Each structure stands twice: as structure tokens, then as C-alpha cells.
Amino acid sequence: MADTGNNDAFVAFERVQKSYDGETLVVKDLNLTLPKGEFLTMLGPSGSGKTTCLMMLAGFETATHGEIKLDGVSINNIPPHKRGIGMVFQNYALFPHMTIAENLSFPLEVRKIGKSDREAKVKRALEMVEMGAFGGRRPSQLSGGQQQRVALARALVFEPELVLMDEPLGALDKQLREKMQFEITHLAHNLGITTVYVTHDQTEALTMSDRVAVFNDGRIQQIAPPDELYESPKNSFVAQFIGENNTLEGRVKEIKNGIAVVQLDNGDLIDAKPVNVEKPGDRTLISIRPERVEFNRDRLKPDAHTLKAEVLEFIYMGDIFRTRLRVAGSDEFIIKTRNAPDQRRLQPGEQIEIGWLPEDCRALDAPQV
Ligand SMILES: Nc1ncnc2c1ncn2[C@@H]1O[C@H](COP(=O)(O)OP(=O)(O)OP(=O)(O)O)[C@@H](O)[C@H]1O
Ligand SMILES: [Mg+2]
């Protein structure tokens, strides 16, 4: 991923590597720049290196190789408390022996801010997260969600330009989580804060972020705005990690006029957009979103390749219908259709024909064996 050389970079990782044991690299050649005010999310499976990247940016870990810059200046040798970064970590607990107000006042005292100024800032930060009435309580007297909001206020109270959040909503129930997602993005955007957010919840990443960096095995697999990540995954890891996808394996038969004809392992032919396959003979994983599969023949080009499918299961989900099919040897092929007055409900046992526009189906790298 080369996205260095950006003059507007507020945060920059340049060729950063990290090893804890001197042997294995858990972060491999990371190049990443964030412009000021961006909300960037690092998304990826457990162990892919997300927290390590955040810890290096915060200054709690040092990079084994490469440089990290803040506003154009290398921060490799600046200690954490001098980096002016706000942090919310999942287990970055509030101080239990202090009241909520004292918890918030602490980062200001450290920065030698006078008493009256401190009080005004604490009040404002608590009001911002709608916790104004709780300043006198101790953390143990608050619910989990309220503690999370206080942690957020504490990270923002000294008006940092950069905030790092590592799974800050991990402990919350769905409803509170969604409310907080909304609050965090609004606060960040309204205050113009640059944010690096870590999660392994893809919905959270897609809904909150300006851009998402998908991590796997110490590398960024793709970095893009949410819609681009969903619509145009660059490889089979991203395609399978973001959203739901139907996949079928096969071999490229030909690539002509920007369309790959793929012979599936059962012999059937289908059309796909070649993404990271190169030539006839290449193994490929074809990938198609459930909402882009068409079973109405007249909505496809007359010469489109189609596949035979058997309906296995029809699930009524209110706004959509979810139908499971047997296709080319797979029993897990899903199609989603909108519940509209003219939409037919497929019946289990029914034999249908499915197809798609080639641009909606991607020929990606085959999984490693
Ligand atoms: N202090 C440490 N000492 C040794 N190895 C570590 C240390 N911290 C993390 N690792 C290893 O580095 C790799 C990356 O870990 P990291 O915590 O960055 O992953 P993560 O993407 O944040 O995962 P999760 O989603 O589970 O939080 C893992 O293999 C982990 O075991
Ligand atoms: Mg982590």
C-alpha cells in the first residue's frame, strides 16, 4: 500500500514494522496517512495487528522499523504524555478512587491548566456526553455505558487534535452501542478531531468511518471509503470479510473485453469482472453479493451465462426475502430480494435459473491451499 508522500498528512506511518520477539513481524511494512479531521477505522480479525498500530501511535510501543509522524514531525522519541493524544481503550479504566469530575480534571492538571479553566472544561466535556449530572459520582456508581461516555469525555476534555479508540464500545449492548457510534462520529466531526478507531465489527466500521483500513496478518489489505470497500473489494480476503458474499471456485477460461469467462469446478460457465486474476488457466474465487443475483431472465443480457439452481429454503425477513439455493455444488448460495408487491416468493424444491451482470460479480484470487 503506497500512500505516502501526502503533504496534507496529519498522521503518517512510513514503512513501519513491529516485532515483539525479534522474529515474527506482527506489523509488516505499514504505510498509512491520515489527513486532519479524518475518521479512520482499522478493521480486521483478532491478532491482525490493529492494537499494535494504535499502541505505536500512542507511544506505548515502539516501532521496530520505520517512522511515525504527527503533523510532519517524527514522534518516535516523544513519550506518550507529550504527544497530546486522547485515548479510549476498552480496558483503559477510569480511576476508581476519583469522582467523575476528578477523573476528567486529571488530564488537565497534568497539563498545568488553572483551576477555573479546568472546571469549565470538565463541565463542558461532561455535558457533551450528556453526563453533566454525574460529576460527583464514582465510576462504580455508573452503568457500563455511562462509564464509556465518561471515558470518551476524558479523552476529549483537553481538546486533543488526535483521538485513538480501541474497541471502545465492546462491552455495550446493541442499542447503546449504536447510540454511542452516532455520538462519537458526531463529536469527532463537529470538533474536527482526527480519529483512529479500532474495531472488529464491520457494521460499526462501515457506518462510522470516512475510510476503513482492512487488516489481515499485519498488513493493510485495502484502505477505502466504506462504499468502495463493499462494492469493489480488491481481493478475496476483503470480499469475504466485508458483508455477505457468495463464492464459487473455478478457473479463468478467457478474458475478453474486460470480462472473464470462468469455468466453475462443476463445468458451468459464468461471467465476471476480472479483479486480480491475470490470464486463462488462473484459479479464481468468484464473488457475488446476495442482493445482486438475478433470477428474472429478462433482466439479464440475452447472451449472459446463467446457472441452474434449486431452491432449498425461503426465509421471510420482513423487508427482504432471503433464499438459500443449491448452485454449482454449493448448498450455501444466498440471494436477497426486496419485499416488493411484484416480487415472487420462491418455493423450496423449485428449479430456477440465476445470473448477474458481469460487473456485479468479481473474479478474485483463489484461496491459498
Ligand atoms: N505485548 C505483546 N507481546 C508479544 N506479542 C504480542 C504483544 N501484543 C500483541 N502481540 C501479538 O501481536 C499480534 C498482533 O496483536 P494485536 O493486539 O495488535 O492484534 P489485534 O488486531 O488488536 O487483535 P484483537 O482484535 O484480538 O484485539 C498477535 O499475534 C499478538 O499475539
Ligand atoms: Mg486489539
Image: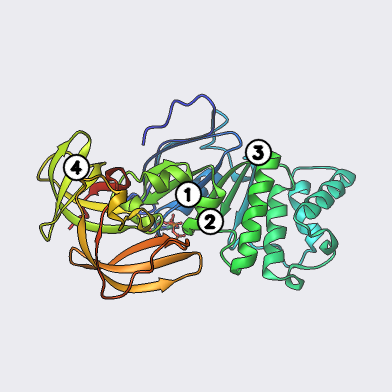
Q: Position of residue 367 (x, y in %)?
A: 22, 55
Sequence-wise, which precedes: disc 4 or disc 2? 2
Number of numbered callouts drawn: 4
Task: Report the colour scheme.
Answer: rainbow
Label 1 beta carbon within 8 A of ligand 1: yes
Q: Which residue is mark 3?
A: 161
Q: CA distance from mark 4 to mark 2?
A: 34 Å
**Residue matched to label 1:** 42
Per the rendering, the mark at residue 204 is 2
Using the rendered view, name the quadrant where residue 314 is placed. bottom left
Hey, which quadrant is residue 325 in on the image?
Answer: bottom left
Mark identifier at residue 192? none
Kindly indicate whether the residue at mark 4 contacts the one at mark 3 (C-beta within 8 angstroms). no
**Separation (CA) of disc 3 from disc 1:** 19 Å
Which residue appears at 19% of the width and 42% of the height?
260
Q: Determine which of the numbered discs, if any, sits on residue 260 in the image.
A: 4
> Of circles 1 and 4, which is in front?
4
Closest to the observer: 267 or 228? Answer: 267
Measure the C-alpha gap from mark 3 to mark 4. Answer: 47 Å
Q: Residue at x 63, y 48 (%)?
A: 185
Q: Which residue does the image show at 39% across and 61% down from the upper left?
A: 336
Q: Earlier in the sequence, mark 3 or mark 2?
A: 3
Q: Nearer the viewer, mark 3 or mark 2?
A: 2
